[in-house]
Image: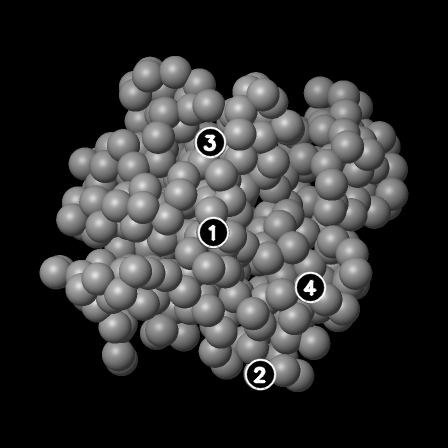
Amino acid sequence: MTLTAGSKLEKILKSGQKAVTCECGPPRGADAEHFRHKASYLKECADAVNVTDNQTAVVRFCSLAACRILMDMGIEPVMQMVTRDMNRIALQSNVLGAAALGIKNLLCLTGDHNSFGDHPQAKNVHDLDSVQLLAAVKGMRDDGKMISGTEVVGRPQMFLGAAVNPFADPFEFRVVRMAKKIKAGAQFVQTQCIYDMERFAKFMQMANDMGLTEQCYVLAGVTPFKSVGMANYMKKFVPGMLVPDSYIQRLKGVPKEKQAEEGIKIAVEQIQQLLEIKGVAGIHLMAIEWEEKAPEILKAAGLLPRPKVD
């Protein structure tokens, strides 16, 4: 087994076992204890935990600090980094700093536009996009060179990831976009929340036909519904999200106080369906302020306990 970073996530994926990552967003303040409390639910059920980077362009405490907190808790982080807020100097600096702290998984993102967040008057930077950031970090790691050509003294050993959305239009372009990220350096990808299983299966068929799943690990994104209101909101207002009416009708068919329980049942069924699709290497569970339910969902889906790797 040849490893680029030697993270637990990389070892599990390369061993052929289904991986589990979860997401934990930092708070909109400096309350580290709140973050620790949420993360504590994920310690035994995830191989690695994604730390978002000012997700939806809303100011939160920084990903680098949150990753350090996870490591102190014995949890392996996946550091997310968006190019929206930093130029190439700051991005490369943060990659080196993260590597120096022992962070081994990096997810490269462009990030949502500032107009979606709580500081719409802020300037987007976008000196690089996610593909360029992947290529930059790969160059630092494999060639020992920064974008400028300056030699890197102490290469950052990072297992590189990217995000993909199989549901945005044009549909046929999504797999091409994924191929571009893999060519730039992505070794694993995590997908947008998947509710439309038929469309995702078609996406994976194209990815398999292009040989992409032999070059990169695909972790399928899952977000449980807490209520029919949440399902309706995601269907109507979240760009690039396809929520079949069948799920909404199913949630409407149970009493309001039972909808969260039904949402968990749906998530478990989705995980089991996703793991049957050729090329799916694992699950990325984004519980969104419902981290305490992650152990219940993953246990019911047969993904606990997590395997041990040396």
Q: From where the camera sits, is residue 308 visible?
A: no
Instruction: Give the labeled residue for mark 3.
Output: 54
Element under disc 1: loop
Residue drawn at 66 percent across, 83 percent down: 209
Whichever of labels 4 and 3 marks the residue nearer the N terminus, that label is 3
Instruction: Give the labeled residue for mark 1.
Output: 128
Quarter of the image with the C terminus is: bottom left
Q: Amino acid at mark 4?
A: Arg
Instruction: Give the labeled residue for mark 4.
Output: 174
Element under disc 2: loop
Q: Amino acid at mark 3?
A: Asn
Residue 51 quadrant: top left
Whichever of labels 1 and 4 marks the residue nearer the N terminus, that label is 1
Q: Amino acid at mark 2?
A: Gly
Residue nearest the observer in this picture, 256 or 171: 171
Image depth: mark 2 or mark 3 in front: 3
Residue 254, given in percent of the width and then of the height, sits at: 80, 29
Q: Which mark is residue 211?
A: 2
Residue drawn at 63 percent across, 82 percent down: 210
Image depth: mark 4 or mark 2 in front: 4
Element under disc 4: helix
Q: CA distance from mark 1 to mark 4?
A: 20 Å
Residue nearest the observer in this picture, 105 or 40: 105
Whichever of labels 2 and 3 marks the residue nearer the N terminus, that label is 3
